[in-house]
Image: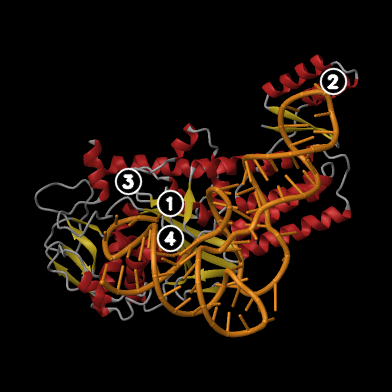
RNA sequence: GGCGCCUUGGCGGAGUAGUUACGCAGCGGUCUGCAAAACCGUGUACAGGGGUGCAAAUCCCCUAGGUGCCUCCA
């Protein structure tokens, strides 16, 4: 499998540490607000990554974090983080806020038919691991403590700038207002923050770093601590949003590799952002469309998934209702095609068609294995479908058909193989309608057709005969 | 100010040198009891200018526009 690796800025052959196994860490949500479609784009990208790895028969050990503490709003000295801020806004405790949005996120994952990570880890449940990692960094001389917390000294980690290709001098020169004068370099980041003295935080823990003040972990340390706990000091693949390259992932690499002396991750994958009306999605722009908004507009989440697949994860995608409608139409065609498998007039596919399925499946697999080229993979599927809708409409039969649908569901996360046959009664109704048409009793024929429509069964009269589809 | 990325037909979106991408929508036609579908046909798409090559959407340079990061961010 080829993966575009941010570490090398090139498409590299994927070679796991252990043959046949793949360890994967993907950055999960910060649960202080509802996830918007941009978040789901990225999470669906990694869902496809896992599906592709599994289709290639890798045993995937996948960890995703839930950031439920410590994600600082800024470097300001106010000791405020997103959870605490969200809590203030909603009149709840930070714990309640985290729980609410965590549940919402998990429901979203399920609704989108996303795979479950092997481990879904909460930052608040790994405070001890984070403290231990910070202590290791202290012992190795990578940290310094100032009034508001323990910081990582990025100047002590050689190559800090190389991952993101940062120019630290320019970073310094061009840096905006520097809030924290005690920081040695602008790029230094908090490993641990002490609680503010003027108010009580909801989330805070005892720690060995200060003068007895309680505190909470910085954002970056959780990913390193949890990734290494579950996946080891070196992991195969680390994936996340493109925005994380210069800060979060640079920091993860610095603190992890400073602590262990080992390469943290061999492959770094970054998903590009999705734009709405030419702008990135952000709270300040008020364009944070949520899954609920899709449902309100009558867009199925499966259509949304297909829409995500229609662009490549590394290109800056566009989100629009028009595109979603196109995806919905495309999905309906795929579903109508999948329904053909119950209406075959032969026991097994003709050899020629069987060969076409085999080559299509190979092409799809190759496209996915080539840095997750989902749009190209869908092209091969569409070509096969239109060929069948054209001349092989009654030949979608046998285990080849079923296996192919299952393969599509496995790699794309669709539900084409799970679409059931219609009932014997419904089949009888179709047959009765055919009789009525034969007798040119159009009124009765139309009544029967309408009857089927009320149970979600549509009919198409084609030169190859009548066939049904679920609408 | 610094560092990147991008610009493909009405819309979305693949494609890193030589084949119809594909999808959605549209248009003309065939077929059809009707709706729908299906089938056939159809659009001089590669931001602009220059360069290299037998050959460029694809490589190089310039220009224009867009956009991302540098600050929390999928």
Distance from disc 3 to disc 1, alpha carbons, whole Å, reads: 12 Å
Distance from disc 4 to disc 2, alpha carbons, whole Å, reads: 56 Å
* Residue at numbered disc 1: A275
* Residue at numbered disc 4: A240
Q: Secondary structure at mark 4?
A: strand
The first of marks 3 and 1 along the sequence is: 1
Compared across the picture, whether A406 is left or right of A124 comes to right
Compared across the picture, whether A85 is left or right of A8 comes to left
Are there few (<14), some (14-19), or many (20+) residues within 10 Å of tag 4?
many
Q: Chain of mark 4?
A: A
The first of marks 3 and 2 along the sequence is: 3
* Residue at numbered disc 2: A432
At a point 57% along the width and 67% down the height, the residue shown is: A21
Q: Looking at the picture, does residue A86 appear above or below residue B62?
A: above
Distance from disc 4 to disc 3, alpha carbons, whole Å, reads: 22 Å
The first of marks 4 and 2 along the sequence is: 4
Q: Chain of mark 3?
A: A
Q: For marks 1 and 2, give the one nearer the viewer.
A: 1
Residue A392: x and y in percent read 83, 46
Q: For marks 4 and 2, give the one nearer the viewer.
A: 2
- The quadrant in which residue A149 appears is bottom left
* Residue at numbered disc 3: A285
């Amino acid at each position: 499998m080829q993966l575009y690796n941010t570490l090398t800025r090139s498409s590299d052959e994927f070679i796991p540490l252990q043959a046949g196994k793949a360890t994967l860490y993907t950055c999960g949500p910060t649960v202080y607000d509802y996830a918007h479609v941009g978040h789901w784009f990225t999470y669906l990208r990694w869902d496809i990554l896992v599906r592709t790895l599994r289709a290639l028969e890798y045993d995937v050990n996948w960890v995703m974090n839930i950031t439920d503490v410590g994600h600082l709003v800024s470097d300001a000295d106010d000791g405020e983080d997103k959870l605490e801020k969200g809590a203030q806004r909603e009149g709840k405790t930070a714990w309640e806020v985290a729980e609410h949005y965590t549940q919402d996120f998990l429901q979203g994952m399920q609704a989108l038919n996303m795979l479950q990570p092997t481990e879904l880890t909460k930052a608040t449940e790994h405070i001890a691991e984070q403290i231990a990692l910070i202590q290791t960094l202290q012992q190795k001389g990578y940290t310094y403590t100032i009034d508001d917390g323990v910081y990582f000294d990025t100047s002590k980690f050689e190559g800090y700038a190389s991952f993101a290709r940062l120019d630290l001098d320019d970073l310094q020169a061009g840096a905006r207002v520097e809030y924290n004068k005690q920081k040695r370099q602008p790029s230094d980041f908090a490993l641990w923050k002490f609680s503010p003295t003027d108010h009580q935080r909801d989330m805070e823990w005892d720690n060995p770093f200060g003068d007895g003040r309680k505190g909470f972990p910085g954002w970056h340390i959780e990913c390193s601590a949890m990734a290494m706990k579950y996946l080891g000091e070196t992991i195969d693949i680390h994936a996340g949003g493109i925005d994380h390259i210069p800060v979060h992932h640079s920091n993860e690499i610095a603190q992890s590799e400073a602590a262990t002396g080992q390469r943290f991750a061999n492959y770094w994958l970054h998903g590009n952002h999705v734009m709405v009306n030419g702008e990135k999605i952000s709270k300040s722009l008020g364009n944070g469309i949520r899954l609920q908004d899709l449902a309100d507009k009558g867009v199925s989440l499966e259509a949304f998934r297909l829409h995500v697949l229609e662009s490549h994860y590394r290109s800056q995608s566009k989100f629009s209702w028009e595109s979603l409608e196109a995806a919905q139409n495309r999905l309906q065609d795929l579903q109508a095609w999948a329904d053909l498998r119950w209406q075959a007039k032969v026991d097994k596919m003709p050899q020629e068609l069987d060969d076409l399925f085999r080559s299509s499946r190979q092409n799809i697999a190759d496209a996915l294995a080539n840095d997750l080229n989902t749009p190209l993979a869908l092209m091969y599927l569409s070509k096969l479908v239109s060929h069948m809708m054209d001349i092989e409409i009654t030949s979608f039969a046998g285990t080849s058909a079923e296996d192919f649908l299952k393969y599509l569901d496995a790699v794309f996360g669709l539900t084409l193989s799970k679409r059931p046959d219609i009932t014997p009664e419904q089949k009888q109704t179709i047959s009765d309608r055919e009789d009525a048409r034969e007798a040119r009793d159009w009124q009765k024929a139309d009544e029967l057709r309408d009857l089927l429509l009320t149970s979600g069964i549509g009919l198409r009269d084609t030169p190859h005969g009548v066939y049904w589809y679920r609408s």
